[in-house]
Image: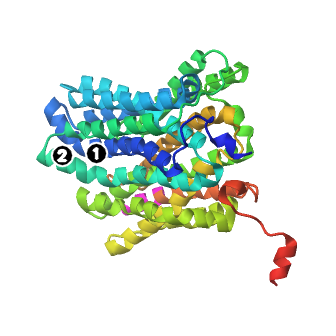
Amino acid sequence: MSDQIFQAAPTRRAAPNFRVVALIVASAMFMEQLDATVLATALPTMARDFGVSAPAMSISLTSYLLSLAIFIPASGAIADRFGSRTVFRSAIAVFVVGSLLCAQAPNLFFLVLARLLQGLGGAMMLPVGRLVLMRSVARKDMVNAMSWLLIPALVGPILGPPVGGMFVTYLDWRWIFYINVPIGVIGFVLVTMFIEEVKGPRAGRFDLSGFILSGISLGSLLFGFEMSSREGEGYLAIFLISIGLLFGIAYLRHARKHPSPIMDFSLMKVPTFRTSVIAGSLTRISQGAHPFLIPLMLQLGFGLSAAAAGQIAIATALGSMAMKPFQVRILRKLGFRTALIIFGLIGTLGYGLCAIFKPDWPLPVIFMILFFCGFFMSFQFTAYNTIAYDEIERDRMSIATSFYSTFQQLMLSLGICVAALALHGSMQFFGHAKAEMADFSIAFIVVTAIALLAVIWNASFSRTAGSEISGHRRKSPEESLGEH
């Protein structure tokens, strides 16, 4: 495929540098990530203002997840119909309006409705933002662009806890949502100035039946996975996951007959896309589990405060940022297949070391292990997010980004579910009333074993997969012999 697949149709305006496009898209991701991590810090204070219990406030988090699950699959079709710039810009505006409404919420019910509106904006920002990047950047710049895209998204979780603590302590929790307004306004203006409008080919009427079936299925699955991490919600979690699976089966039957389904599973016939989705999903289960397990282990197993545990847990995000300057050179030297196998194995086994952490270990040692885990795992996610679209034709790019984003969100939530089930299962087996270090060890071993399966799938990539993107060129037998 040529570079034109990833570029918008020519217009009178000069195309901006790929770093500009990536950072504009990343500003939206930063806003979304910062909002999620800051909100978690402020929930106890918000609960007191609303006169409800702190656990009841968790619905403000799950309502956002529910909105994401319903609307992400529709994002590609909507971007094709109305244009990727229009939809991306509108998504930022909806997210900002939702943030303002959250800041004005007089009670929990109003907050939940505002979070649903925020989720609608967030559901469009992530996949459509990625689509904007794919359509605006030449293939040779894709790895670099993806690295720039992910840096602000990684900064959000790092800044979230201290920013949230500052707002709650010195200002008011409502500033958690007001902070999105200037970021969103700047992003809106920059999108208008630098992002070209691109519409995909119309593929018949909107798949309303598929939208409803997929929304119920994904919403129930995400809600069920999230509930599984809470004490006393096991039966509700099982019920929701069962509903999600039933409606998922119904959607698959519907999709086989529909000419343009909202989630096109025929994309899984494309080799690099299929391998990236499967291997990336297995890896993201581990990525979703560790932010859940590590703070719990540090607080319950090590006896650290929440603040101290948070300072150690950010090591993985710092490691992820440290990898960014090296990714292009690594891919040019090794290629996607070899690099994913090597870095996947090292990163996953590094996370496996969490199973042998002990309270008497020096905290700087634990910090450095988590730092290098983030360093190696970051490479994998940039590589998966890039090579997934290597063989995707231009007219299927929008449906591919929404499909990929849906699985990405689902697997992160499934990671929490798997970790919670392994932790609670170990507690039941050993008869522990509270989670102990042995229980955390078993949970880490389970998610590590799942992530190791991704290495097997990585081996199924072609040796030349993504070579045009990475710039990697295999040496011919004559060249190899000449070196000896």
Q: Would residue 435 be counted in the magenta stretch?
A: no
* Callout 2: SS: helix
x, y (%) of residue 401? Answer: 58, 37
**Res. 247 in view:** yes
Q: Quadrant of the N terminus?
A: top right
In this view, the residue farthest toward the bottom is 484
Q: Which residues are magenta?
A: 436-443
x, y (%) of residue 141? Answer: 60, 53
Dominant SS of magenta comes to helix
x, y (%) of residue 17? Answer: 52, 49
Q: Amino acid at mark 1?
A: Val
In this view, the residue farthest toward the right is 478
The residue carrying mark 2 is 167
- Please count the marks in the image: 2
Looking at the image, which residue is at 63% across and 22% down? 250
User: Tag on residue 38?
Assistant: 1
- Towards the viewer: 245 or 87: 87
Where residue 463 sits, quadrant-wise, is: bottom right
Q: Would residue 440 be counted in the magenta stretch?
A: yes
**Res. 351 in view:** no
Looking at the image, which residue is at 32% across and 72% down? 363
